[in-house]
Image (tube, rainbow, N blue to C red):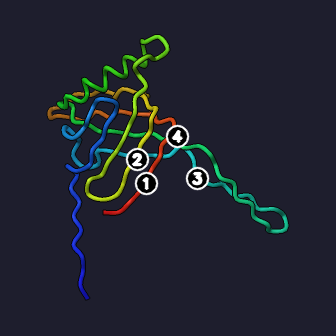
Amino acid sequence: MSYILKVYNSDEVIVTFGPVIIQNGLADGEFLKIEGETDTTEEVVGTDGEVAVSRINDSRATATILLMQTSEHNDQLSVFENLCRNAKGMVGAIQPFAILDLNGRTKLFGANSWVQKAPDRSWDRTATTNEWTIRIAHLARIDGGN
């Protein structure tokens, strides 16, 4: 039996938020997480055991990006967080968000996203990480393999 060698390289995961292309300055270990707001389906069972499955049409999601405190992308994301906080009608704050995994076939995209929360800050003897929260109104996704 022959086996195929698969390779994953975190340097080949590209994250974009509007004009910001995040390919460096990422935290050690886990640096990106996507969480859907709701399950895709919900089911209800009747007294007689009949099951009804309902599709939940909620494709909202939250992206969490962990950056080193030294990353220039903190400055760039901070601009958009300030637009969310201060711009009338959040003009300029709503941006497209995308993840492309060049290792394989995973692609995620949302046309309307914004910085929901700036990172909580702390300082330490060594460099720490900043956790940015991005909300995505409608996430389209293909969760492929490598």
CB atoms of marks 1 and 3 within 8 Å? no
Q: Is residue 134 above or below residue 41?
A: above
> Dots 4 and 3: beta carbons under 8 Å?
no
Quadrant in the picture for the C terminus: bottom left
Structural distance between the alpha carbons of marks 1 and 4: 15 Å
- Residue at label 2? 108
User: Is residue 35 depicted above or below 80 in this figure?
Assistant: below
Name of the residue lying farthest toward the bottom: 1
**Looking at the image, which residue is at 46% across and 17% down?**
90
Q: Secondary structure at mark 3?
A: loop
Instruction: Tell me if mark 4 has few (under 14), some (14-19) or many (20+) residues whose alpha carbon lies within 10 angstroms of its own.
Output: some
The extreme left residue here reads 126
SS class, disc 1: strand
Q: Position of residue 135 (x, y in %)?
A: 45, 34
Provide the residue designation for mark 1: 142
Q: Identify the disc placed on residue 40.
A: 3
Residue drawn at 46 percent across, 32 percent down: 112
The type of residue carrying mark 4 is Arg
- Residue designated by label 4: 60
Q: Earlier in the sequence, mark 1 or mark 3?
A: 3
Q: Earlier in the sequence, mark 1 or mark 4?
A: 4
Callout 3 crowding tier (Cα within 10 Å): few <14, some 14–19, many ≥20: few
Residue projecting furthest to the right? 48
| Alpha carbon distance from label 2 to label 4 | 12 Å
Task: Work out whether mark 2 precedes mark 3 in sequence or the reverse, and give the earlier one.
Answer: 3
Label 1 neighbour load within 10 Å: few <14, some 14-19, many 20+: few
Q: Name the spot of residue 105 as percent of width and height, x first.
A: 34, 58
- Give neighbour class at mark 2: few <14, some 14-19, many 20+ (Cα, 10 Å): some
Q: Quadrant of residue 72?
A: top left
Q: Which residue corresponds to the image point at 31% horizontal and 22% vertical from the top-left?
A: 78
Q: Amino acid at mark 2?
A: Leu
